[in-house]
């Protein structure tokens, strides 16, 4: 069958696929608080079963992993990595429609997880539907690895991939996400930064104290936390942990070349997020994009201590904590970073500040000149009608290093995302036109890869 | 009638008075979020009406003020200042019984507000009951001024006292609180520190951002807040706002003499709050007590930003805020402190940090050698069977300066509190034995003052 008939199938069956996606998005699956994970895994497995996949739900130390395999025409195997878990939906009051009641509006589907990552997963199943309907078989063997802890740093996935390397073996991998940039040009991400996510917490007393009593003589957990955080990074944005930058390699000319070919993003960021400036005096261009994705970071993701309601409460907090994520570049290791952080806090007098490991993984990058990358970019040009931009590193993170380390496969991205999809934020959404294009792209990749 | 018959009345009617107090404590009256204030004011007014007071509820720009007056035998007038509002009860999960379901346990009544300040108020009404029951009249004229915004810095009380100075006029005032120390010795507080309570807030974008995108190029509200707070005070506890200490007078020999006569508190604080050390290398003695109450402070009372739930969420917060209270010593002015804070933040590059005024008042101290103080301390010795300690300044704050400024009266303390009453904290409580002693002391003061 021709590619044209596959494309027609997808156009004709879009509503059905969106209905299936809406069902999946209506199932909360919040890994940060272990909510609805098994229910969601069962739904995903059933979706693979319906399409003739041999499936299994593997238990891990955390959320289960859904695995599925269906043999295809050629001896090639393409692996899809996805996740069925989602970020917490809070703050709820900023959602225009409830996060777990998927709603179509302005050509978009709104729901927590619709873009990250349920829409990507379903668009792949949709592409498989089209191939099976028009050709009766798949062009190559397809395997799905769909985990449930991506949003909490994939703590248990490495053991799973390592222990099941033979089962998961393949020739190439399509990563969980992908899509278009601010100009609707398709983009290819060659790598992901690493991450080291920790909670810093302090307890200075067994209970909160009236601030009139202890303000000048009792240790205050909130002050301890503020000072400890301040010791990590100052307004110059330089991370002050000794050794933090030791393994950071300089930006290569090839990276700068790839980044220089990318469209400008500064004005889009300014408008989308209402920014009046960027950090470090950056105004745009190559430097902004290099800084955005190719340097390591230290981000406070949350602060909590004492009284946080309306008005005033004169209390001296006994407890305070912060969520902190470090984004890492190649060669930086999360466990080493945690050890450096501990040593730094101790050296600065903050032995009372506890570090809780909330997960992490190193960075991983695929060679821009790998043949599989050529297949993905050339099929994207066919489907999107314009060239695909190659982004050498995404600012985000994920467990791609495991697939590289244990399965030794090139990893490409292709998907249904766009820069306004508000992943991790209220009103997360997915454009239906990009859903269709994403499914088409996957179908084209499978055809070309299996040929 | 003799004092003995008054004391007998109080012992015989304790249960009735506790029942009335429990009713009052069951009524939430949280000024920080304007919850239940009018309902509580009406209850308090009815309690005064029942005792033959001429009453009124005066509207203010905020919570209403309950006023009551009953003429007495002599031409002297004693003013009681109390408040019917309470602190927010959070964190709710730390209460053994619900904060607005008063519960008797181990000889104590547990409820939000039972110690601060509803127990004090009712013990005064209880003393009046005893005098009226045994003597048929009061020894002197009694006036009550009972406001509803003490826990939010009494923002509207100054205008009320100023505008009603003739109505409120009197010869002396008993403050809202008082009680015993860690050894059950009665204590007399001669003054209160001032307070300047502010919220610092920052907004860096119109929405939260995925931390993988903006971590190294977008301003982060949580970092801005941390750095701004760090600029206010470092681990050496010195407040870094230029001019903050300019009006602070040295500690006088008379103050040191009074403080030196007080019992040691260090071990009690260590045990009660589970502290392993005090700030500034303090270990106890006069220095600890001087630092506790006679120096100005800067306390973070709360921090809030970004994700605060379980596990991880990779988000770059667009908003962050902190509650901060400054305790002030005589001659420091809250409005001046706010202006110094604004100038400091601007000078340090934190013009993006907004300051919201959540109330304040200056410090105020009564002369230790005033005749009214002699009446209060000598009657305390009768009732408690031991001498009363004179504490030249409480670490806490309140609007006592207004009564001094507009009514020109000496202000003394007498009440039902103890150091384990957990005012402002979960499991706030009041000892029934101290309630009875407090009521007896008030009855004795009224007799002696009216004589």
Image (tube, coloured by chain):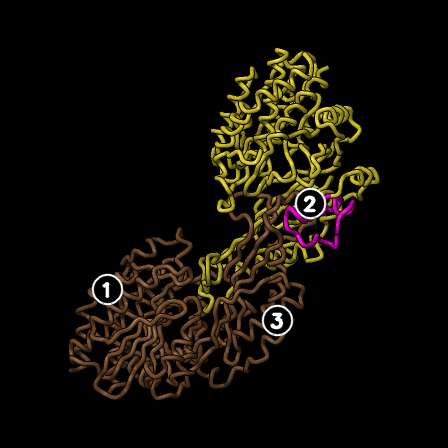
Chain colours: A yellow, B brown
Depth check: give the residue in front, B367 or A340: B367
Residue B428 lies, in percent from the top left, at 36, 61
Q: Is residue A155 visible?
A: no
Say which residue label 3 marks.
Answer: B241
N-term-proximal mark, 1 vs 3:
1
Depth check: give the residue in front, A310 or B302: A310
- The quarter holding residue A426 reads top right
Mark 2 or 1, closer to the camera: 2
Chain letter of mark 3 equals B
Chain letter of mark 1 equals B
Q: Identify the image quadrant of the N terminus of chain B.
A: bottom left
**Residue at the (58%, 41%) spot, across then down:** A424
- The quarter holding residue A230 reads bottom right
Mark 3 or 2, closer to the camera: 2
Say which residue label 1 marks.
Answer: B20
**Residue at the (67%, 32%) spot, across then down:** A179
Residue range corresponding to the magenta coloring: A265-292
> Exactly how many numbered labels are in the figure?
3
Is residue A362 within the magenta segment? no
> Looking at the picture, does residue B46 appear above or below residue B260?
above
């Amino acid at each position: 069958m021709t590619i044209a008939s596959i494309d027609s199938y997808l156009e004709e069956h879009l509503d059905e696929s969106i209905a299936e996606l809406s069902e999946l998005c209506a199932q909360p699956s919040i890994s940060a608080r272990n909510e609805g994970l098994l229910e969601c895994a069962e739904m995903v497995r059933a979706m693979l079963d319906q399409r003739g996949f041999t499936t299994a739900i593997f238990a891990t130390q955390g959320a289960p992993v859904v695995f599925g395999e269906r043999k295809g025409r050629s001896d090639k195997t393409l692996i899809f990595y996805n996740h069925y878990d989602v970020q917490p939906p809070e703050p709820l009051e900023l959602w225009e429609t409830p996060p777990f009641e998927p709603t179509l509006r302005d050509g978009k589907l709104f729901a927590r997880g619709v873009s990250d990552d349920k829409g990507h997963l379903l668009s792949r199943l949709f592409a498989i539907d089209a191939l099976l309907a028009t050709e009766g078989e798949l062009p190559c063997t397809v395997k799905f690895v769909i985990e449930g802890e991506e949003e909490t740093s994939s703590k248990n996935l490495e053991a799973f991939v390592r222990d099941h390397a033979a089962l998961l073996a393949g020739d190439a991998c399509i990563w969980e996400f992908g899509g278009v940039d601010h100009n609707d040009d398709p983009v290819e991400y060659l790598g992901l930064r690493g991450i080291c996510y920790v909670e810093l917490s302090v307890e200075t007393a067994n209970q909160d104290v009236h601030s009139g009593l202890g303000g000048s003589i009792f240790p205050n957990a909130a002050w301890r936390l503020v000072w400890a955080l301040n010791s990590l990074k100052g307004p110059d944005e330089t991370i002050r942990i000794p050794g933090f930058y030791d393994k950071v390699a300089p930006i290569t000319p090839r990276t700068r070349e790839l980044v220089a070919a990318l469209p400008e993003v500064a004005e889009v960021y300014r408008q989308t997020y209402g920014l009046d400036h960027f950090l470090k005096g950056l105004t745009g261009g190559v430097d902004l994009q290099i800084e955005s994705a190719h340097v390591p970071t230290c981000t406070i993701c949350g602060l909590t201590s004492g009284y946080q309601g309306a008005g005033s409460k004169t209390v001296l907090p006994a407890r305070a904590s912060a969520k902190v994520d470090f984004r890492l570049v190649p060669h930086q290791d999360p466990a080493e970073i945690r050890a450096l952080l501990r040593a730094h806090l101790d050296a600065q007098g903050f032995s009372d500040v506890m570090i809780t490991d909330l997960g992490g993984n190193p960075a991983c990058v695929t060679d821009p000149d790998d043949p599989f990358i050529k297949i993905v970019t050339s099929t994207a040009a066919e489907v999107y009608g314009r060239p695909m931009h190659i982004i050498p590193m995404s600012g985000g993170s994920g467990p791609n290093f495991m697939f590289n380390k244990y399965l030794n496969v090139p990893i490409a991205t292709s998907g249904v995302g766009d820069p306004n999809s508000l992943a991790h934020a209220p009103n997360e959404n997915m454009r239906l036109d990009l859903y269709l294009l994403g499914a088409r792209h996957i179908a084209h990749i499978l055809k070309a890869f299996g040929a």
